């Protein structure tokens, strides 16, 4: 909510993200750095480190190993589906709803329930960037999230391409997973194990499972921070 949105008519893609990150890195003249990221952010960090391996010293990935594996047919279907949804949504003139603060907090909790559990404190933390006071209804708020983020032109890859991409990464790797995460539950799949083997060949590799689900960094931030601090 504190960053400029893309201009109308431009969809969100993984490439948008990489260009923005590279722009910031160039601006601050960063030569070597650590990328600490969660979920889709961690997937994008892996992709960035594949493209610019000499820049990324460490990757700290929270609740993903980057196994967004799809067949060629699935990739094409997902991309075409999201393009159609995006263009259909553009035709609609939907006014943002105003909500009370408590309604916003509950909406954040409910909106994340597909992948895990966020408590009230975690929702209030996210609300700092997710909502702003309404200019029309005093005492009420609106969500500032760009609706286009629900229709990202997704770019998954077959497992062999991901393995090859990740093999170019030089960075050390720490992976922190929640033992109740949906992504741990699927970690025994052949494709996930193949990708994990690529990570294990990296220098100073660590894989740690802790108590928690997909949002372990919000529900138990001190525990995660201690693991990260000891690693770096």
Image (cartoon, grey):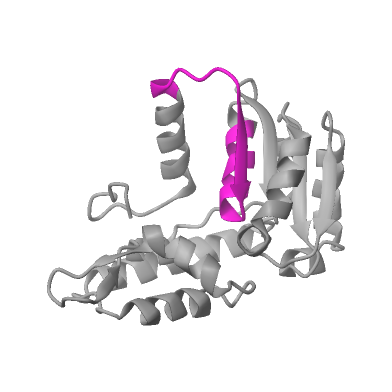
Residue 163 appearing in the image: no
Q: Position of residue 171 (x, y in %)?
A: 72, 29
Q: Quarter holding the N terminus?
A: bottom left
Q: Position of residue 48 (x, y in %)?
A: 57, 35
Q: Nearer the viewer, residue 106 or 185?
A: 106
Residue 92: quarter of image: bottom left
Residue 127 appearing in the image: yes
Q: Residue at x 68, y 53 (%)?
A: 222
Q: Residue at x 75, y 51 (%)?
A: 176
Residue 211: quarter of image: bottom right
Does 81 sit left or right of 211 as displayed?
Answer: left
Task: Name the residue at the left extreme.
Answer: 136
Q: Position of residue 94 (x, y in %)?
A: 22, 76
Rendered position, 121 above or below 75:
below
Q: Quarter holding the C terminus?
A: top right
The magenta span reads 26-49
Q: Residue at x 37, y 62 (%)?
A: 130
């Amino acid at each position: 909510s504190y960053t400029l949105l893309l201009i109308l008519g431009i969809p969100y893609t993984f490439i948008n993200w990489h260009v923005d990150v590279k722009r910031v890195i160039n601006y601050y003249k960063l030569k070597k750095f650590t990328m600490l990221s969660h979920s889709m952010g961690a997937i994008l960090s892996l992709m960035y480190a594949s493209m610019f391996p000499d820049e990324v010293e460490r990757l700290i990935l929270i609740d993903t190993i980057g196994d967004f594996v799809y067949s060629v047919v699935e990739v094409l279907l997902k991309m075409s589906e999201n393009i159609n949804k995006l263009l259909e949504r553009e035709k609609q003139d939907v006014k943002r709803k105003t909500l009370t603060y408590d309604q916003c907090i509950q909406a954040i909790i409910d909106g994340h329930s597909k992948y895990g559990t966020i408590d009230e404190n975690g929702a209030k933390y996210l609300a700092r960037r997710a909502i702003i006071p309404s200019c029309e209804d005093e005492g009420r708020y609106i969500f500032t999230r760009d609706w286009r983020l629900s229709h990202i032109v997704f770019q998954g890859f077959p497992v062999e391409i991901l393995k090859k991409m990740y093999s170019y990464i030089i960075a050390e790797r720490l992976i922190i997973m929640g033992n109740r995460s949906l992504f741990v539950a699927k970690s025994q799949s052949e494709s996930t194990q193949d990708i994990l083997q690529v990570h294990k060949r990296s220098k100073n590799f660590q894989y740690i499972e802790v108590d928690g689900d997909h949002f372990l960094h919000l529900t138990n931030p001190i525990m995660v921070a201690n693991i990260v601090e000891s690693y770096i």
